[in-house]
Amino acid sequence: QVQLVESGGGLVQPGGSLRLSCAASGFTVSSAATSWYRQAPGKERELVAIITSAGGSTNYADSVKGRVTISRDNAKNTVYLQMNSLKPEDTAVYYCSADVRSALTTFRYWGQGTQVTVSS
């Protein structure tokens, strides 16, 4: 079955960096559009970054553009989110998602989330 397991969150000071990992199983990351979302307390979940299946094109939310890079390692079947120059407003639970296609439909799967806290 499809599973997404995030890791790499934690407490970091403003200006610091973190790399989040999303280990996938049950499908290949190169065959699915995979994304990172985040949800801060009291706010709606928002898209942070996406990497497409074909070609691996990327797109980012304006709030993180220039500070965040999404990438994938097909050999490890893992998607990453490198975050630099972190700000307190980046504090949130970060979720990995994947749009996995089957013969009949496409279904969005979610990981359990990893907490990122940016604070001095």
Image (cartoon, rainbow, N blue to C red):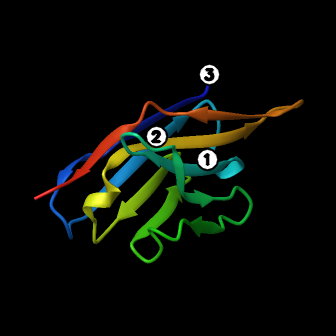
Q: Which mark is residue 29?
A: 1
The residue located at (34%, 57%) in the rendering is 90
Cα gap from disc 1 to disc 2, whole angstroms = 9 Å
Mark toward the start of the polypeptide (3 vs 2): 3
On the image, numbered disc 2 is attached to which residue?
23
- Residue 1 is marked as 3
Residue 97: x, y in percent?
57, 41
Q: Position of residue 1 (x, y in %)?
A: 62, 22
- Quadrant position of residue 101: top right
**Label 1: few (<14), some (14–19) or many (≥20) C-alpha neighbours in 10 Å:** many
Give percent across and percent down for residue 110: 55, 34
Q: Is residue 103 left or right of residue 91?
A: right
- The kind of residue tagged 2 is Ala
| Residue at the image point whose x is 71% and y is 66% from the top | 55
Q: Position of residue 25 (x, y in %)?
A: 55, 32
Task: Point out the tag, 1 or 2, that comes first from the N-terminus.
Answer: 2
Question: Where 86 sits versus 3, above or below?
Answer: below
